[in-house]
Structures are given as C-alpha cells and as structure tokens.
Amino acid sequence: MYVPPEWPAEVRPPSVPDWETSAVAWLLDAVPPDYRAYEVLRRHPIALARMAGHHVNSAIEAARTGYRRAAVDLKSHLPPHAIEAVLDAYREEGPRLVRLARSIEVVERALRGDIFTATMRHP
C-alpha cells in the first residue's frame, strides 16, 4: 500500500492490521505527556489526531512569534552570540514542527478512512 512521503516511519501503514495502535503511540509522543491520562484519546484516535494537530499548529505559531521577537525580547539579557544561538534553535525547530504537523495530518486522514494513491508529477 502506498503512503505519502509525510507518513511517519514509526507508524505502520494503514494496510497492516491494527496499524492504529502504532498511530496512537506515535501521536501520544507528539503531544504533552499529560494527554496520556485521557482514555478517550486512546479509544478515539481521530480525536487524538485532531488534538495533536491543534497542539503542534499552536507550537508552530509560538515558534514563529518567538523567532520574530527573540532579538528584542532578549537583547538586554543575553549577549549577541547567545541570541543568534536562540535564533538558530528556532530555525531548526520551526521546520521540524511543520514536518510533524504534515505527518499528523496524513495520519489523521488515514484514521478517517482516506486511501492514498501515488500520482505522477511532471517536471
């Protein structure tokens, strides 16, 4: 079965029996540990995926805001090289979070029953 490039390696393909178990485990790793306390999220993986999507999208917005404001917010507290290191951390974290959000989206689509097909792309 085809899975899109954004499909996380930790999640078995939807063609494998009980693949949802690996999806739930992966999604729980994408959210704060406190989410594990809610049995409803294990019973209803679509709800977990939706909450994970909201959580990660909020983190993306927070990282963007933090990046834009870091130099001003930290100028009187950190030396320039430390501020640049903070900006570097945001430059790495932002794209990681965007990749994670895309992966959550495709897993959620699969949980909803979408079937993925490979498409040819023209150069």
Image (cartoon, grey):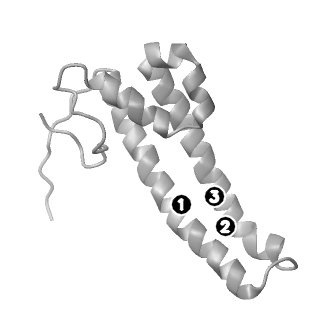
Q: Which mark is residue 94?
A: 1
Marked residue nearer the N-terminal end (1 or 2): 2
- Tell me what residue is drawn at x 14 percent, y 38 percent: 2
Q: How many marks?
A: 3
Helix, strand or loop status at disc 3: helix
Q: Which residue is mark 2?
A: 67
Camera sees residue 108: no
Name the residue type under label 1. Gly
Name the residue type under label 2. Tyr
Q: Are marks 1 and 2 in contact (CB under 8 Å)?
A: yes
Q: Could you tell whether 19 is left or right of 95 in the image?
A: left
Task: Please state, as top left, top right, bottom left or bottom right, where the C terminus lies in the image.
Answer: bottom left
Q: Which residue is mark 3?
A: 63
Marked residue nearer the N-terminal end (3 or 1): 3
Q: Position of residue 20 (x, y in %)?
A: 31, 23
- Tell me what residue is drawn at x 46 percent, y 57 percent: 96
Q: Are marks 3 and 2 in contact (CB under 8 Å)?
A: yes
- Tell me what residue is drawn at x 82 percent, y 79 percent: 75
Q: Quadrant of residue 33?
A: top right
Other residues around mark 2 within 10 Å, as few (<14) / some (14–19) / many (≥20)? some
